[in-house]
Every structure is written in structure tokens, then in C-alpha cells.
Image (spheres, rainbow, N blue to C red):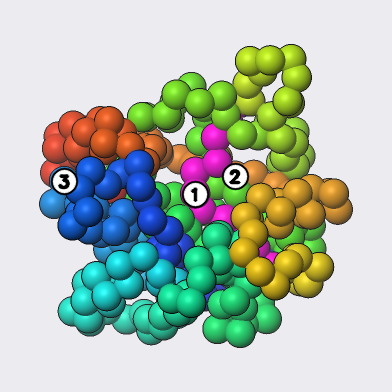
Amino acid sequence: MIKHAKIDRAMILAAGKGTRMQSAPDDPPKPLTEIAGQSLLMRMVARLETSGIQKIIINLHHKADHIKQAMATYNGPCEIIFSDESAALLETGGGVKKALPLLGDAPFLVANGDVLWREADNANAALPAFLAAFNPAQMQALLMLCPTQKATGYDGAGDYDRRDDGQLTRRPTAPKGASAAYVFAGVQILTPRLFDALPETAFSLNLAYDAAAKKGALYGHELDGQWMHVGTPQGRAAAEAILATDTKDTNS
């Protein structure tokens, strides 16, 4: 019987500037963008709460005071800890590596600050299913995926192909115009040891994915739901239109 790790710590990446989303200097940071009346940040916090997460680390840099103020009213069951990157923006990978002392020695979940999806059948089961899919005996990184052709607000060529055993390979760089079956949906489970040989300075989490792939330890799990890319005003408008018709799932 496969023994799966219990994952009870998570990190939300909220330090980035999100320049594509903002249209004016006084706009809120991207994680505080509201879609159908609720911010992206609080939507993710709510999902983490209902998935057994006990501690949430949120990294801060751009408009950090806005994030802190938004979380000041939080009275849910999760412990909220901020990881300060005010001295320098460390990108996704550097931000996670800086927060490792807060995340502990066990596998942990990391979510981008602009992740949004609508559950299949409004069941709130997608994130628990993703957590349950992580097998520490095989995996050092597990990425949540959406079929490229089903992603809302996304017009890219995808990121990964997935083998029958769940292992991932990157979209080929040739020939020109090549595509991949899946796009990364912004949520991942990572192991601390994956960062041992990675830089102490700013770097992308793509380095961690590539390191896991070289060890045959990069896997993917398909999201059971409708993933929405909201990195642009156009994507946000599309998500608003979808969620405006959904009155049953406030954590979509």
C-alpha cells in the first residue's frame, strides 16, 4: 500500500508586481484583484482551509502593506505567516527557498497568487484530490495541470506533455510552433530537498521543475475543474463572465 504524505503547510506567492494585470499605479496588487466579488488571495486561502492546510506562508514585496491589510481581518483556522522580500524580489524559486525554514522539512504546497478555477460540480474536491495524489516515494514535484485546449483566457502553446505514468516532459522547442497537451495551472507540491543545489539568490521555480525532471521525479495531476488564466485584463473579464453565472460555489 502506498503511503502518501500528509501536507499541512502551504505558500502563496504574492510578491510579484503583476504588471500585466494592473492598469493604474494605484490598482491593488494582483492577488487582491477581485473576481466576482472575492479576491484571488482569499479564494485560495479558503481552498487551503478546506483542504487540511494548517499554516500558510505568504511572501511579500510589491505593495506589501496592501496584502497585510487584507489579511489583518482574517480569522480562519490557518496560521498566517509573512515572508518578507522587501529588500529584493526573489522571483518564484528564490522566494520559496527563503521561506523553507517556515515551511519545514516535509513536502509542501505552493500556489501562485493569481490562481483561479471553478470546481467540477461545485464539489470543492479538486485541491484535496491533488494533495492526495502526491507520492513522496516517487515525486519531488507534482504540478497541477489543465488541458491546454480547455484553459480559459489562455492562448499559449502549453507547458508540458504527460506520460502514461504521470511523468512530465517540457513542450519541445522545435519545430517552431510546437505545442504541449497541458498548461501549468499554478499549484504545485514540492519537497525541500529539491532546493539543496539551487541558487541562494533570485531564480524561477522552473529550475526546480527541471531538476526534478532530471531525476525522473517531476509528475503532473490534471485539475478536475475549469481553470482560468487571469494574468491580463482580458482574462479577468472572461473569468468574471463565467463566475457571474455561478451562485453555488463562493470559493470557485
Name the residue at 70% across, 47% down. Answer: 219
Q: Earlier in the sequence, mark 3 or mark 2?
A: 3
Residue at disc 3, secondary structure? loop
Q: CA distance from mark 3 to mark 2?
A: 27 Å
Q: Residue 196's x, y, as percent?
A: 78, 72
Amino acid type at image mark 2? His
Q: Is disc 1 surrounded by few (<14), some (14 to 19) or many (20+) residues within 10 Å?
A: some
Q: Residue 249's x, y, as percent?
A: 22, 49
Q: CA distance from mark 2 to mark 1?
A: 12 Å
- In the image, the segment drawn in magenta is 181-191
Q: Is disc 3 surrounded by few (<14), some (14 to 19) or many (20+) residues within 10 Å?
A: some
Q: Which residue is mark 2?
A: 221
Residue 183, image quadrant: top right
Q: Residue 182's x, y, as percent?
A: 58, 31
Count of numbered labels shown in the rendering: 3
Q: Say whether marks 2 and 1 touch (CB < 8 Å).
A: no
User: Which disc number belongs to residue 186?
Assistant: 1
Residue 188 on the magenta segment: yes
Give the dominant element type of the magenta stretch: helix, strand or loop. Answer: strand
